[in-house]
Amino acid sequence: MAKHKDQFKCTACDGLTAKWQGQCPHCGEWNTLEAHEEVVRSAKRVKVAGSPPPFYSLSNPDEPSRYASGIGEFDRVVGGGLMEGSIVLLGGDPGVGKSTLALQLCKEYVEKNIKVCYFSGEESVGQLALRAKRLGLENDDLKISNEVELSKVLAGLESEKPKVAIIDSIQTSYSPNLDSLPGSPNQVRECTSELMTLGKKNNITIILIGHITKSGVIAGPKLLEHIVDTVLYLEGDKQHYFRILRSVKNRFGATHEIGIFEMKQEGLVGVANPGDMFLSERKKGATGSVVTCGMEGSRPLLVEIQALAARAAYGTPQRHASGIDQKRLQLLLAVIERQLDIPVSQYDIFVNIVGGMKLKEPAMDLPVIAAIYSSVKNIPLPDNTAVIGEVGLTGETRSVMRVEQRVKEAVRMGFDRLILPASVKKKIDNKKITFKFIKDIVELIGPQV
């Protein structure tokens, strides 16, 4: 179908303009513009006859296998090992240990005779060799390349046919078919899509290492997280010696599982008993200190919550929360002031989960209130006591999920007294420790606490 577009053409310089005027805007000649009709032909839609796709039955599927790495904390997070032919996206802050963890996986896999290809767009082969030597990886079976052009990366995977491939990072990869720069949304989307297609076709497990933005999400289009099978975040900072590997999406396992690592000279070392680490330096008899048990995925974690209440030095009291939700802290302070008649509005309140953990579940409510009350009144809780429970706006306590598992972990860590919501009394059957079941926070501050 043709469309006509009216323009004016200069007889002196052949320049085109959208409207008539006495002087040509291109060459400056007068009275040289004449009506000019340009025929614009629109592209026709061509109907392409495609062949029918292959169909398969679910009764006898070819069940993919898992590649267990031998790194216990990593395998826990991904569901027992990397699934054959899956696409895994690993994100995290700069320097948190993404490339270190990737090289440790390479070490474990090549020792198990699983062929691995590592494409590094950020480090040279010499730099990778130094890091690998520090991690104890001195195996020539690992294939390393600095190639970042997508077509060559795909050709390399086709020729080598590895079981596992690592792309470090997806933001440095680029397709020559696109004009945009590496790291742009179009490039990231195109490269991930092509790698996914090749991985599914040849049963190659691909790990994509991704940068994150200032807001803490993986850079590039959100579509990237929908394309891949598993999304992992490696969290931590330079002020703390441990790292947390968190699963936020997993098509082949549980989500919101975590693995805890300690950063050492030889790389990331799994922490089997994180409760021992979080409570190892706890001060005995300290006011404002309360131990609670949070859940990360299916794992119970005993952590220490510290609260500090100081008389406000300025007109507006300060509120600062580290490890819990800031808005939740504001809500709990309002409940304390209303239900316990404690003027917390006259205090600067600081709440911190020791060790840098972030637990934003409702079970933190009751221990946070207990810690703030302990600090305001300067009354320490017994060292052998743990507190667990959610609190409503009227001060009532509510049950939390997996309370039996939390109690079991507290007993394992040596706590012999627990303060819990009254609604979970029928669920608990443990004669080894003493329980105090409370209906509201008024009962929490009774003399028997």
Image (cartoon, helix red, strand yellow):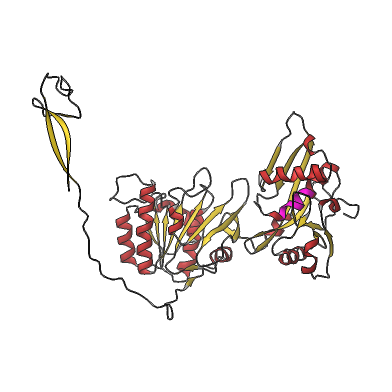
**Image-quadrant location for residue 258:** bottom right
Residue visible at 53% across and 54% down in the picture: 233
Considering depth in this image, is 400 or 132 the residue closer to the camera? 400
Residue 428 location (% of width, % of height): 78, 68
Residue visible at 32% across and 61% down in the picture: 156
**Image-quadrant location for residue 439:** bottom right
Considering depth in this image, is 304 or 108 the residue closer to the camera? 304
Residue visible at 33% across and 66% down in the picture: 160
Membership of 127 in magenta stretch: no
Residue 274 location (% of width, % of height): 67, 59
Q: Is residue 14 left or right of residue 53?
A: left
Work out whether 379 lies above or below 20.
below
Residue visible at 85% across and 43% down in the picture: 378
Considering depth in this image, is 325 or 323 the residue closer to the camera? 325
Residue 117 location (% of width, % of height): 39, 62
Quadrant that contains the C terminus: bottom right
**Image-quadrant location for residue 310:** top right
Q: Is residue 270 left or right of residue 391?
A: left
Q: Is residue 358 left or right of residue 211?
A: right
Q: Is residue 224 left or right of residue 73?
A: left
For the magenta stretch, what is the residue range?
363-369
Magenta-colored segment: predominant secondary structure: helix
